[in-house]
Image (spheres, helix red, strand yellow):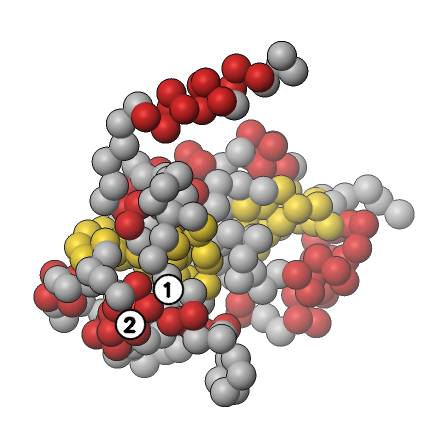
């Protein structure tokens, strides 16, 4: 039996500059690469001469057939869009492939969004927690949690794959936060056509206007490549107080003194 692998390579929001060195080396060894649109465009310089397939064009069993055929001659790669850690459809393949599968992490969408905004999402004294959630996965039963259950003062909320019209989303967030907190809508992060709209719950609807960032008017049901961030830390200005407190009370003991 050959020793070829199936690599699930974290490709983050789609900027090839964020690909890790380990991910790049693994991709170089592969002839067959499963790559979702539009990553075949942004990663074009790394994919020359390779056989490219869109994984979402196939049923599960068909994917396995292509993978097994590709493994006869070389390793196979999947460029995983967004974050493998959250809302990834590839877990079934990884479990089925067992020891043949290797997962390589990358720079996730949440990390890239935080960097683009130049904001830490859990500032001490401002935000006590950061919560990743998607309205698409919360469920419809009365006992299932609602978005409002996570929208709380002192919480940074990262909303993936939103399918709620923006005015309705803002109203629900306002009921949870109970104040006019900052919000950022990041569309096509690190991809051609990137747009970032910054505002507050009071003015974000007017700032977005008629732009359909969530594909709610589109004929297809494909989730939009849009991330929503909400919370006080997005607008907070930090000074050196937190740094000095840590220096005096935590960091000075890092060597066990």
Q: Position of residue 76 (x, y in %)?
A: 66, 49
In this rendering, does residue 252 appear at all? yes
Q: Position of residue 169 (x, y in %)?
A: 29, 72
In the image, 77 versus 247, the foreground residue is 247
Q: Is residue 147 left or right of residue 205?
A: right
Indicate the secondary structure of the residue bearing disc 1.
loop
Q: Is residue 4 left or right of residue 146?
A: right
Residue 176 vertical placement versus 111 (above, below)? below
Q: Position of residue 172 (x, y in %)?
A: 30, 73
Residue 81 vertical placement versus 208 (above, below)? above
Q: Position of residue 150 (x, y in %)?
A: 42, 65
In this rendering, does residue 188 appear at all? no
The residue lying at 53 percent from left, 83 percent from top is 143
Q: Which mark is residue 208?
A: none
Q: Which residue is mark 1?
A: 151
Q: Which residue is mark 2?
A: 175
Indicate the secondary structure of the residue bearing disc 2.
helix
In the image, 29 versus 197, the foreground residue is 197
Which residue reaches farthest bottom?
142
The residue lying at 62 percent from left, 74 percent from top is 59
- Labels 1 and 2: the sequence-earlier one: 1
How many labels sit on residues? 2
The residue lying at 45 percent from left, 18 percent from top is 248
**Position of the C terminus by quadrant:** top right
The residue lying at 23 percent from left, 44 percent from top is 235
Discs 1, 2 touching: Cβ within 8 Å: yes
Real-space Cα separation, disc 1 to disc 2, in angstroms: 8 Å
Residue count near mark 2 (Cα–Cα under 10 Å), binned few <14, some 14–19, many ≥20: few
């Amino acid at each position: 039996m050959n020793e070829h692998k199936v690599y699930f390579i974290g490709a983050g929001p789609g900027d090839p500059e964020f690909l890790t060195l380990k991910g790049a080396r693994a991709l170089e060894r592969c002839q067959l690469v499963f790559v979702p649109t539009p990553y075949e465009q942004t990663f074009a310089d790394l994919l020359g001469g390779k056989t490219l397939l869109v994984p979402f064009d196939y049923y599960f069993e068909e994917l396995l057939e292509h993978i097994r055929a590709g493994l006869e001659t070389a390793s196979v790669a999947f460029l995983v869009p967004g974050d493998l850690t959250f809302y990834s459809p590839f877990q079934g393949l990884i479990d089925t492939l067992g020891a043949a599968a290797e997962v390589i992490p990358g720079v996730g969408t949440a990390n890239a969004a935080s960097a683009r905004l130049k904001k830490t999402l859990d500032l001490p004294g401002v935000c006590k927690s950061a919560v990743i959630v998607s309205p698409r996965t919360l469920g419809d039963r009365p006992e299932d949690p609602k978005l409002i259950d996570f929208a709380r003062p002192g919480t940074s909320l990262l909303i993936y794959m939103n399918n709620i019209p923006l005015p309705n989303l803002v109203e629900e967030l306002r009921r949870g936060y109970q104040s006019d907190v900052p919000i950022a809508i990041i569309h096509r992060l690190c991809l051609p056509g990137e747009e970032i709209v910054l505002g507050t719950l009071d003015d974000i609807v007017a700032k977005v206007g008629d732009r359909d960032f969530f594909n709610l008017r589109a004929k297809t049901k494909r989730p939009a490549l849009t991330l929503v961030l909400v919370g006080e830390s997005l607008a907070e200005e930090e000074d050196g107080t937190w740094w000095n407190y840590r220096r005096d009370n935590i960091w000075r003991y890092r060597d066990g003194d």
